[in-house]
Amino acid sequence: MTPPPRRTLPDLRQRSGLAGAAAASAAEVEAALDTPPDPTSAAFFDVDNTIMQGASIFHLARGLHRRKFFTTREIVGAAWKQAYFRVVGVEDPEHVAEARNSALGFIAGHTVAEREELGEEIFDEGMAHRIWPGTRAQAQLHLDQGQRVWLVTAAPIEIAQIIARRLGLTGAMGTVAEHRDGVYTGRLVGDMLHGPAKAEAVKALAAREGLDLSRCSAYSDSYNDLPMLSMVGDPCAINPDGRLRHHAKEQGWRIRDYRTGRKAARAGLVVGAAAGAVSGTVAAGVALRRRH
């Protein structure tokens, strides 16, 4: 039997392009700026570990777990990936793929309206206090200069739009999940808005809004976002992973780090995060035993 053909590079590019176009077309302009806008200049911010401490998809998943969307075992697995992401600061492709599949699994059959309503609640209880003040100040600086500011994230576009709206930003681009008649199908439009797909989304939005990318800024913590950072005139590495920090130094890019004592605390965070995950599992087990 002939084995199925391997996925080709053009197919990956096509999926990234589709994801980027979908994200750009779904981007909202939440509110007009008080100051006259600079029509050709804007700023683009990654979310996870750039705007917000940790992974937004994990905070969303934890909030949904509290509302009985999925099991304790699944949230413990997500907790370990969250601990890895926070401590190491590098996105594991396998973790990203697993997060995508898990996210699609638990939203299939639910309505867009339901997810948006829950997203507002989950932002208040699990995300608002994790916003990095320094990054928020950077975004506000662009707004004060009359520029538009968009979030660009692999997180679901619905939660990205909530974050943007709560921070008073222009809008957001994120991963677009397919829905029909207001109900999620469990499939994506294209792929996750990750890596090259972010660059495609920024390119599509720039064409739509008449932006001059050489006058735009981009912010991220991850080397995976190099395509987006490299396409603007003013890239900035925020809370960067090792590879991005090295690249940014070589290129003379701005670097901002709003984490405190990261080197001294790194070993302790690894142990603490692992212990927290284990403790959570034990506590969940005790609760389940009592219930039964």
Image (spheres, grey):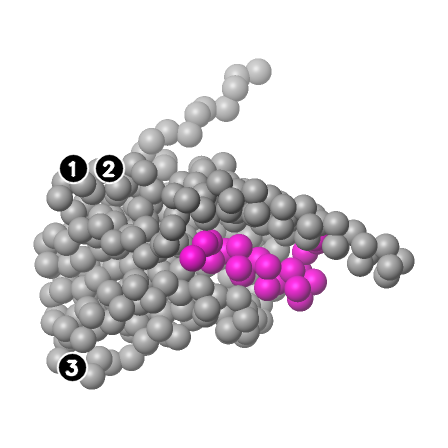
Q: Which quadrant of the view contains residue 14?
A: top left
Residue drawn at (66%, 66%) of the image: 67
- Which SS class for mark 3? loop
Q: Is residue 69 visible?
A: yes
Sequence-first disc among 1 and 3: 3
1 vs 3, front mark: 1
Q: Residue 246: x and y, percent?
A: 24, 37
Name the residue tied to disc 2.
246
Kindly indicate whether the residue at mark 1 contacts the one at mark 2 (C-beta within 8 angstroms): yes
Sequence-first disc among 2 and 3: 3
Name the residue tied to disc 1.
250
- Which SS class for mark 2? helix
Most distant residue in the right direction: 292
The segment highlighted magenta reads 53-72
Q: Is residue 114 above or below residue 208?
A: below
Left or right: residue 261 versus residue 207 is right
Give how far apart the Cα atoms at labels 1 and 3 are: 36 Å
Name the residue tied to disc 3.
35
Q: Residue 269: x and y, percent?
A: 51, 46
Q: Is residue 201 visible?
A: no
Q: Residue 141: x and y, percent?
A: 20, 70
Q: 69 or 219, which lies in front? A: 219
2 vs 3, front mark: 2
Left or right: residue 115 versus residue 50 is right
Q: 80 or 257, which lies in front? A: 257
**Number of residues whose C-alpha sits closer than 10 Å to that of mark 3, classed few (under 14), some (14–19) or many (20 or more):** few
Give how far apart the Cα atoms at labels 2 and 3 are: 37 Å
Q: Amino acid at mark 1?
A: Glu
**Number of residues whose C-alpha sits closer than 10 Å to that of mark 1, classed few (under 14), some (14–19) or many (20 or more):** few
